Image: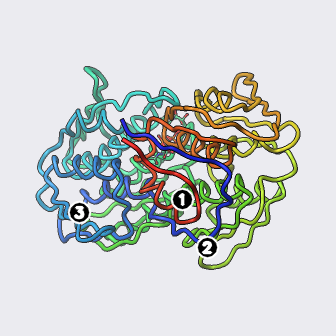
């Protein structure tokens, strides 16, 4: 098993370029199978293990996916014939469940393994199912998968109110509604930038999606969709991770390609802590750190503080003076990084969904293990600021969402190597 060896203490400085957003690419590749004509060229695609997995899922359904360069994918889904997604692939990556909506819309039926839970929570799909049923599908859950079948010959537009502002459910319903007969209105929809990016790709394919990014999305179904060209938005979570890594080391890092409008709550909290942030049209610069004031952070659906930045921010809070609070309101079990940070000397107490962090002068290097993608990023950040050497295990989690993380960090001065 490979691991990172990090020698803490180097101040990070210089410029690092952010990749395309993993959480935009995954739904967009799922949506690409809606195209019964033409082909799609998707640019700024980070070739992560999760992106490989979703590519394998749509290839197994009959699509052709060709990597034209490091970051350009060519997708031809004219010959998609299968309506059953490969169980082993769906179980490997739960976001594969996003093919359910497109399959149902294009093939009239779909069977996808229940993605099941993961380290951070049970991750139910009840809102996705509620949406498919509202669109006129018969849905059966059992034997480890969800099977849906359109009653009649086409999904019918309808009004759907989401009980939870679920990113995945909003995306799955939007993709299914794109080929439905008539208008669908999704209320209490999720508003993440990745939803807007998916809507832009669907509209480029000939769909009619309005209101993405607000909590009411209107989709007027069309007869068919054709492949389109699309450049994926930059990864706001990767960008935020680099800003916090800089702050952890008192560094001066420019994150090229980051869109500050996608990171408002993270930037606001870093400024509140006392970090100097400069924003321009090409990126965001973080200067100084780790900060001199404690923070109260609560994760919320967009535009609130992103749950995917919670662990990374907590790593920084461990060395901010005073008492900070972190409340995780999106997932029920997203504090696994706490025990690992405590091994590095952090003073953290958990009360239900809230963690109380009492700042310590510095963390000390230790051997720690990532439990999920963002917890892994948090442990790397902690290691960069710690005294001594930190060993981060569980890199398969980190490689799912961060492309060549150690190379990027080394270019801005980190002392980090990957060892087998
Ligand atoms: C997406 O997951 C992201 N993944 C997650 O990023 C991110 O943490 C999450 O949105 C929240 O922002 C991708 O985009 C591939 P949700 P998703 O449906 O769509 C509950 C990462 O690190 N819920 O918005 O699965 C659910 O249990 C990953 O890149 C239901 O109860 O998230 C959770 O508590 C981790 N029923 C909350 O809603 C449902 O039918 C938010 O989940 C669906 C969700």
Residue denoted by label 1: 409
- Residue 297 appears in the rendering: yes
Q: Nearer the viewer, mark 2 or mark 3?
A: 2
From mark 2 to mark 1, how far is it between C-alphas?
17 Å
Q: Check the picture and name the quadrant holding the C terminus.
A: top left
From mark 1 to mark 3, how far is it between C-alphas?
39 Å
From mark 2 to mark 3, how far is it between C-alphas?
34 Å
Q: How many marks?
A: 3
Please, which colouring scheme is shown?
rainbow
Mark 1 lies on a secondary structure that is helix
Q: Position of residue 16 (x, y in %)?
A: 55, 68
Image mark for residue 35:
3
Q: Earlier in the sequence, mark 1 or mark 3?
A: 3
Q: Position of residue 279 (x, y in %)?
A: 70, 73
- Please give the name of the residue rendered at 30% of the width and 43% of the height, measured from the top-left corner: 100
Mark 2 lies on a secondary structure that is strand
Residue denoted by label 2: 283
Quadrant assignment, res 247: bottom right
Quadrant assignment, res 339: top right
Quadrant assignment, res 318: top right
């Amino acid at each position: 098993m490979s691991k990172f060896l990090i020698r803490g203490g180097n101040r990070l400085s210089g410029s690092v370029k952010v990749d395309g957003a993993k959480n935009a690419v995954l739904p967009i590749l799922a949506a690409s199978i809606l195209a019964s004509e033409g082909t799609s060229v998707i640019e700024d695609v980070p070739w992560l293990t999760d992106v490989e997995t979703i590519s394998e899922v749509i290839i197994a359904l009959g699509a052709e996916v060709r990597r034209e360069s490091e970051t350009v994918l060519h997708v031809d889904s004219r010959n998609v014939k299968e309506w059953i997604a490969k169980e082993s692939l769906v179980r490997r990556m739960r976001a594969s469940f996003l093919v359910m909506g497109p399959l149902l819309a294009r093939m009239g039926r779909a069977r996808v393994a229940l993605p099941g839970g993961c380290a951070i929570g049970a991750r139910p799909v009840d809102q996705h199912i509620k949406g498919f049923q509202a669109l006129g599908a018969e849905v059966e859950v059992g034997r480890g998968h969800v099977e849906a079948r359109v009653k009649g010959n086409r999904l019918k537009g309808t009004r759907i109110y989401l009980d939870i502002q679920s990113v995945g459910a909003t995306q799955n319903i939007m993709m299914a509604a794109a080929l439905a007969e008539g208008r669908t209105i999704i209320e209490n929809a999720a508003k993440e930038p990745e939803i807007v990016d998916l809507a832009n790709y669907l509209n480029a394919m000939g769909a009619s999606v309005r209101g993405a990014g607000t909590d009411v999305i209107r989709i007027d179904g069309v007869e068919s969709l054709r492949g389109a060209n699309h450049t994926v938005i930059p990864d706001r979570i990767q960008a935020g991770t680099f800003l916090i890594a800089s702050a952890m080391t008192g560094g001066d890092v420019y994150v090229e390609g980051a869109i500050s409008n996608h990171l408002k709550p993270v930037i606001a909290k870093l400024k509140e802590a006392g970090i100097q942030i400069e924003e321009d049209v090409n990126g965001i610069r973080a200067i100084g750190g780790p900060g001199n004031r404690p923070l109260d952070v609560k994760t919320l659906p967009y535009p609130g503080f992103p749950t995917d930045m919670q662990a990374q921010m907590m790593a920084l809070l461990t060395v901010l003076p005073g008492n900070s609070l972190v409340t995780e309101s999106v997932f029920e079990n997203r504090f696994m990084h706490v025990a690992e940070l405590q091994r590095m000397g952090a003073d953290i107490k958990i009360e239900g969904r809230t963690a109380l962090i009492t700042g310590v002068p510095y963390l000390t290097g230790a051997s720690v293990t990532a439990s999920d993608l963002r917890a892994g990023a948090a442990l790397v950040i902690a290691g960069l600021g710690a005294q001594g050497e930190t060993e981060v295990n569980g890199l398969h989690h980190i490689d799912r969402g961060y492309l060549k993380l150690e190379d990027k960090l080394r270019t801005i001065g980190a002392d980090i190597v990957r060892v087998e």
